[in-house]
Image (cartoon, rainbow, N blue to C red):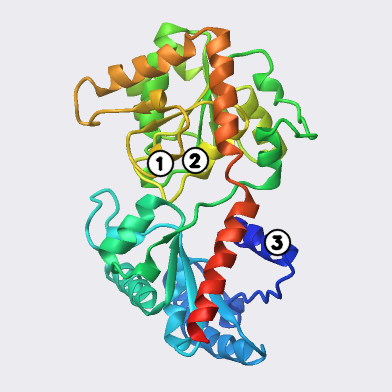
Amino acid sequence: MFRFRDLLLAGLQAKGLQVELFNPPVILGKLGARNRGLGKWIGYIDKYLLCSIFLKRKIASIQGQRIVHIVDHSNAFYTRWLSKETTVVTCHDLLAVRSALGEFKENVLGASGKQQQAMIVGGLKRAEYIVSVSKATCMDVGRLIGEKADWLHHIPNALDRDFIAEARGQADDKAALPSSLQSCRYVMHIGGEKWYKHRILALKVFAQLHQADDALRFVVVGPSYTDAQLLDAALTSSAKSSIIYLTGISDAELRAVYRHCELLLFLSLIEGFGWPILEAQACGCAVATLDREPMKELNANQRLVLEGELEDANWLSDASAQCQHYLEQSSEARAQARASAQRFAARFTNQESVEAYLALYREALQTTE
């Protein structure tokens, strides 16, 4: 969310707009807010009660026409105190809302979590405009919030300028690969341990690819797989020794890792957007995704959209065969795929995103005149 906010802020300021950034203040939280127990509730007092006072003061200090843009939909409940303002909310996903409604058996929320999501839904329903970062999220908004036209805007996220420069062949920060990768061929996975990332699936596909080429390595950008039984069940001892973990790398180093990667296995069950898909392609790295939105809409190479149902007994072997076919293509075919992926990713500029938001702001201000 910070990345999205910073890109939009920089883009609007570059257009000459006056932009005031308001972050919920931390007051009682200084006494020891935590992610659990009493500390968690102390943080909620800041967020749900005290912040509204400071927000109204901030808005009152701004003269002339104004729009209040809530850049993180999880703060949509603040629309309760913005009834006299023109409000735009960017919705990045409704995964937690859907979890609260029982749509994902993998992620069951407790009573307080369900109440929090109900507050977010109420806040979204009070917003004048809702912008979704993907078509899939926009469909969720229509289904769960409402089909009002002003709630169904779609503006994709943008890549930052370094990835755009990479996609256009203009990058000037060619960081070196980590030493552990400099003499090997590898596929990779990137992501944390959230349930929808489905990291086990990437592991299983790599296991199949490793059977065909035992020199292939599996680079994991993120936390280590910690379940020893899972690793034993999914991988041979040779494949287990072929995993390379990378943590704490810079953006420049990440681009180098993408640049030399054979294939990114990004097999999330669902995403709000799926930034790594575009980032990898900007660096010329092909991406294997499931045949689901919004991942599919961001994949320039539809031959690497892995079709079929995961419950199908043949899915893993069929999906791995699709990936293997790509890896075995001629160097010329791979070069063409690389160039196509980079052209596709280069379209997702911050300038395009900012222009789309500006058009929406103008529409909103004309409506209120």
**Mark 3 or mark 2, which is nearer the start of the sequence?**
3
The percent coordinates of residue 251 (x first, y second) are 68, 41
Mark nearer the viewer, 1 or 3: 3
Q: Amino acid at mark 2?
A: Gly
* Label 2: which secondary element: loop
Mark 1 and mark 3: Cα distance apart in space? 30 Å
Q: Report, in whole angstroms, how far the alpha carbon at label 1 lies from the one at label 2.
A: 7 Å
In the rendered structure, are the residues bearing label 1 and label 2 in contact, judged by CB atoms less than 8 Å apart? Answer: yes
Mark before the other along the chain sequence, 1 or 3: 3
Distance (Cα) linking label 2 and label 3: 26 Å
SS at circle 1: helix
Judging by the rendered image, the residue that carries numbered circle 3 is 10
Q: Are marks 1 and 3 in contact (CB under 8 Å)?
A: no
Q: Are marks 2 and 3 in contact (CB under 8 Å)?
A: no
Which of the 4 image quadrants contains residue 54? Answer: bottom right
- Can you see residue 240? yes
Is residue 211 placed above or below 4 in the rendered structure? above
Q: Which residue is mark 1?
A: 197
Q: Amino acid at mark 1?
A: Lys
Q: Residue at x 38, y 63 (%)?
A: 152
Residue beneath disc 2: 191
The residue carrying pointer 1 sits among few (fewer than 14), some (14 to 19) or many (20 or more) residues within 10 Å by Cα, namely: some
Q: Quadrant of the N terminus?
A: bottom right
Circle 2 crowding by C-alpha within 10 Å: few under 14, some 14–19, many from 20: some
Q: Is residue 95 visible?
A: no
